[in-house]
Amino acid sequence: MIATRGSALRPLARALADERADPVLLFVEGLAGQGKSHLLQELADLPETANTVRVWWRCGVDGGPSDGDGDGDRRVPGLWLVDDVHRADEDELRRLRLVLEGLGPGSGAAVTYRPEELSVPGLPLGSPPMAYPPRMTVLRHRLGPWDEERVHRAAVEALGEDCTAEAVRTLHERTGGVPRAVVDLLAVLRERRPAFTGTAAEVEAAGTPARLTELVLSRTYALSPADRPVVWAAAVLDGPAGRDELTAVSGLGAASGNSALLRALEGAALAELGEDRYGFAVPLAAPAVRACVPGPVRQDLHRRAAGVLSRRQPVVWHAVAEHHRAAGDGHRWIKAVEKAAESAAASSRHQQAVTLLEQTLATPGLAPRVRARLAPLLARSAVTGLRSDQTVEVLAQIVQDASLPPAVRGELRLDLGLMLCNQMGRYPEGRRALETAAAELVEVRPGLAARAMAALSSPYWPGDSIDVHREWLVKAMASADASGDDSMRTAVLANRAALATSCAEPDAWELVKQLPLEATDPACARQAARGLCNAADSAVWLGLHEQAEDLLAEGRDLSARSGAPYFEHNALGAQLLQEWWTGRWSGLAKRCEDFVAATADMPLIASDAYIVRGLLALAQGDWGEAARRLSQRGTFGTEDLPVPLTATAAGAVVRLALARQEVEAAAEQARAAWKVVAEKGVWSWAAELAPWAVEALARAGDNATAHTMVRSFSQGLGPGDAPAARAALTWSRAVLAETEAPAHERRDGLLRAAELYRQAAAAYAELPRPYAQALAAEGAARCVLTAYTEAHDCPAAKAGSTATSADPASDNASTLSATTELESCAQRFTDLGAVWDAARTRALLRTRQPARKGRPPGRPSHADELSPREAEVAQLAVSGLTNREIAATLHLSPRTVEQHIARAMRKTGALSRRDLDHRLGGAPRNGERLFPTGDSRTVRAVEIC
């Protein structure tokens, strides 16, 4: 009977708890290092064994049993803990059998052993078999390896949270999940200098732990010299192999090889891993054995291994190449590398091809003709795959080789330029490389020249104007037609569609429909995938969200099917922006963090996630985090970002400066960002910048520039379908109307602004963009309340207004309607998780609402609970705002804020702001509500604690 680990100890525990129960004998079987002794200790520590006489018997060490309690207890033993019975000799086994046969009611025994080291396989107590008493329950528990999740927990305990999923996977694979090997390898990594950073490469480089090395070498050298080659063969093959393969690699004949394999299995030097599959129980043992094989012998083993693996189907060419290299056969090594790279690229395993080719090209003394053959293979896979700094360095060196044929050098320079622009974000360098490549290729390879020109037509990067990009596109179309290459025509079509959709040109979406989505040529399919993903990105920026959703799904699917991970990751970044704008904030911060982690070595691709995370932090009131994310501090400067991301980040930074009352700084940032957009000339990309830039300049007194911005924005948009930009244009006009009306026309100007804000809110609702809709609706309500409040407070302003109502009831109705709208905005912000906006809107409500009639004098008592205002201030404080920033948000004095925070800390028992965060259960994140039932909620201190 086989018991699971969870149930293994229960029968023994029950027997020990009842003196009349039948005795229980539990055999615990496991390979070296799988935790048998640990399981015995768990059994000894069970509460049910506390009053039981426990006797430890460590076979081959103690020579017999020892009193586990150490008190000289002379009672009859109730629990026998027998460890490593495989070490016992015949005499000790005989004595142990007598003890176990004599177990009485209410007693039990647990016996551990390594099955691979038993003197008689399958018989832990040797031969003859034990005579089990009739009423004895006999169980067997087989310990298995840890799964990946358990290895991950051990890694976190030993190394912290920095261990990547790839590193954990490698750790699990190399140790086979054997607990002792896992723990020992983690100890090696913990002591590593420089400190372990969490990568799979570091796990691979850590080597074999000393304990495992000693075990596997002792077993190997326990074999006769004639039998050891079969273990060496397993070490060189470094993976499960068949009997005939091991025999062939070892160089032994069939009969000798079979005999050697039997001896290796009997001595546990090798293990049976499956049907006709043999190797090391712990894969990490192979390097330790391989390192002890004499060099000439090892080379012969590798030579024979290359031949054996070449006969497997399908051939794993990168493994064959490594064996040829280790055997010293340079010619066959390079041929195998080429086949491996071509095979990997054909099956869309571009990163594998890139890694292999980088390593090969980095080999000192590689012949120039070999480098010329391998470099184009590297470049093709690198452009389609993900970022590699080493690839860029390799290509940059190779293109300097004057001996390269011009066509080869031009192709390499093209791929280098594409990588510099797309994966690295080094656009000025990339543009120069692409321009040079286009000139080098236009006569000899017009198709590749078209690809370079098409890349130069992309408007996303800062610098050239849209007119320059259109000129490059015309040249690209001519070169693509001259080449007769369908994949290059598709590449140029993808760029035509990208430029047209970005500018909201009338025929843009017809161009997208022309992309050959069903192409059977992988190159055409990848270019079509690129076109779809770029069109989806454009649709997101334009505010065509329903269309974008379909395009994103199609683009990701085609990218995955055609083996284009770079394009797929671009689409995933656009998806984050889509979710931000359409209000799908629940879990969005986590999705951004996951995307950043997944693209850690590609900060440019991660830029979408950084910007979205910064926008979320701003709405939540975590202004320090917002500034860090929006500037991508420590990763990638915003000045090098694609223009739409630059404008979006700048709009948020301007808004943050305005919230902090840093008006002049906001105005300077607005002018700089607007210049980038204006020089580019793609005006739909100004949508996230314009309202805040106009407000910054108007508040700084630069109304002339603010008007010029609005006029340029309006003229630049033209007739194209760019609903998000048109809504932003209306919003910008509302900001002008709100900020610049002269005193004698103040009320009229505010009411005109309110109407424009309403139009903007309605436009955003159509997209939908709920956050922008709520911000615009807040502006409309704010203008109405300000208009009527100022008119009430200042009769002269009311007298000068042409829009003054003669009906006080109508004024009251308008005020009530605006108040209701403001309350609705506050709730919408709360539902989204926009903590700062919700707090600001509620503060505005309190400053504009008239005092309620019939309210009892004085303030309600909140002796043991947080008042609504204290809770509001506390939440903003733990989100990261300073007292001054909270005061500006809530229309309070810094001193009042300080008092509210002090009371909140006293009532919750918090010792600091960080502790206050803990007492409040953590600041609200996206999708969580600050005050789920509105401003009237109170929070009891006892609930918080």
Image: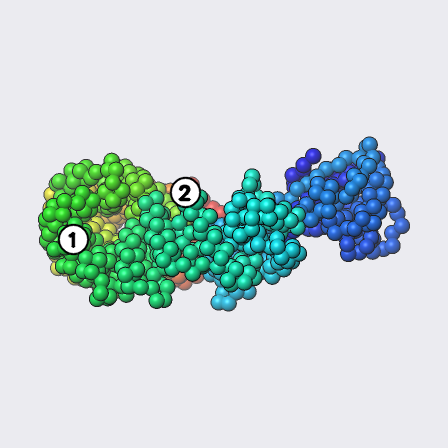
Q: Decide which of 539, 699 is in the foreground and name it.
A: 539
Whether label 2 touches label 1, CB < 8 Å? no
Q: Decide which of 657, 362 is in the foreground and name it.
A: 362
- Residue 515 appears in view: yes
Residue 528 location, x and y as percent? 23, 42
As drawn, the label of residue 549 is none
Left or right? Give the position of 326 relative to 185: left
Q: Secondary structure at mark 2?
A: loop
Residue at image coords 56%, 48%: 253
Residue 286 location, x and y as percent? 55, 55
Q: Mark 2 and mark 1: span between their CA atoms?
A: 35 Å
Q: Earlier in the sequence, mark 2 or mark 1?
A: 2
Q: Decide which of 589, 806 is in the foreground and name it.
A: 589
Q: Give the amino acid type for the residue marked by disc 1 in the picture.
A: Arg
As drawn, the label of residue 314 is 2
Q: Residue 821 sits in which quadrant?
A: top left
> Compared with residue 221, is residue 275 higher up or lower down, i.e. above or below?
above
Residue at image coords 39%, 61%: 882
- If the image is split into quadrants, where does the N terminus sit? top right
Q: Which scheme is used to colour this image of the protein? A: rainbow
Residue 146 location, x and y as percent? 58, 47
Q: Give the amino acid type for the residue marked by disc 2 in the picture.
A: Pro
Q: Residue 627 sits in which quadrant?
A: bottom left
Residue lying farthest to the right in this orientation: 74
Residue 567 location, x and y as percent? 29, 47
Q: Residue 561 sits in which quadrant?
A: top left
Q: Decide which of 246, 23 is in the foreground and name it.
A: 246
**Number of numbered discs visible in the structure rendering:** 2
Q: Where is mark 1, residue-wise?
A: 445
Residue lying farthest to the top in this orientation: 134
Left or right? Give the position of 237 relative to 17: left
